[in-house]
Amino acid sequence: MSCSLFKKIPDNSVQGSNISISWDDSDYNYDNTNDEAEAKSTIEIDEKNTVVDSKFNDKYSKILRVELTKDLNKDLVIECSEWIGTKYRFGASQKQRTTDCSGFVRKAYEKVYGVQIPFTSLSMHKELAKIDKKDLQEGDLVFFNINKKHVSHVGIYLFDNYFIHASVSRGVMVSSLDESYYKKFYHSAGRAEK
């Protein structure tokens, strides 16, 4: 099983009621509308002065099956959504085919953050900086001790205790650290330099 996810939205500025946003949206389709006024009506600024794209969040909330928070790394969201449902197979790491947890995390991390991390969940655990569970941030890795001998599973933390990983039984999916199974086997968390 394995996981990955999010990154901050690029520069934005607010002047009066005008909002300007710059990002490469070549992979994002505003669902059959080229109407600039309608597209702009879906973009807001939240209480932290962060750009909120409600159409983007609605689209990817459905794919990931979890309501997205307001300020997420679009590259991470898109990359994770492309892995959702990929079947589990030990030693594999091919998007939309088969993968194991560490293969998924490693590939997604490299694509989103441009960072190479170790090949196995155990080596990731050993090499990454340890962090407290209460300090988890988007993109941190969460480790589980399912086989009771050592760390044997990894996922990518998203937000609000949600993480994405490759489950042996259900493939790549989003789960919660609050679920009793993951509470029972949670081991630790780590952070890679991004």
Image (tube, rainbow, N blue to C red):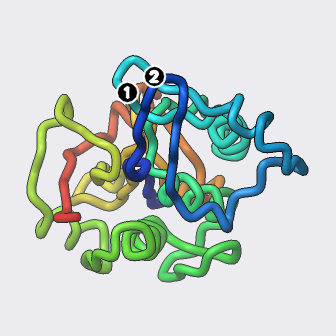
Bin the neighbour count of mark 2 within 10 Å (Cα to Cα): few under 14, some 14-19, many 20 and up. Answer: few
Gap in angstroms between the C-alphas marked 1 and 2: 5 Å
Q: Amino acid at mark 1?
A: Asn
Q: Residue furthest front?
A: 16
Callouts 1 and 2 close, C-beta under 8 Å? yes
Nearer the observer, 113 or 1:
113
Bin the neighbour count of mark 1 within 10 Å (Cα to Cα): few under 14, some 14-19, many 20 and up. Answer: few
Q: Position of residue 34 (x, y in %)?
A: 85, 50
Q: Position of residue 86 (x, y in %)?
A: 66, 66
Residue drawn at x 20%, y 73% is 123
- Marker count (numbered): 2
The residue where tag 1 is placed is 49
- Quarter of the rendering containing residue 89: bottom right
Residue drawn at x 23%, y 64% is 194
* 132 to 45, vertically: above or below: below
* 178 to 19, vertically: above or below: above
Q: Residue furthest top?
A: 47
Q: Amino acid at mark 2?
A: Asp
What numbered label is drawn on residue 46? Answer: 2
Would you say residue 143 is visible in this rendering? Answer: no
User: Relative to 189, is 15 on the left or the right?
Assistant: right
Q: Position of residue 56 (x, y in %)?
A: 66, 42
Dot 2 falls on a residue whose secondary structure is: loop
Dot 1 falls on a residue whose secondary structure is: loop
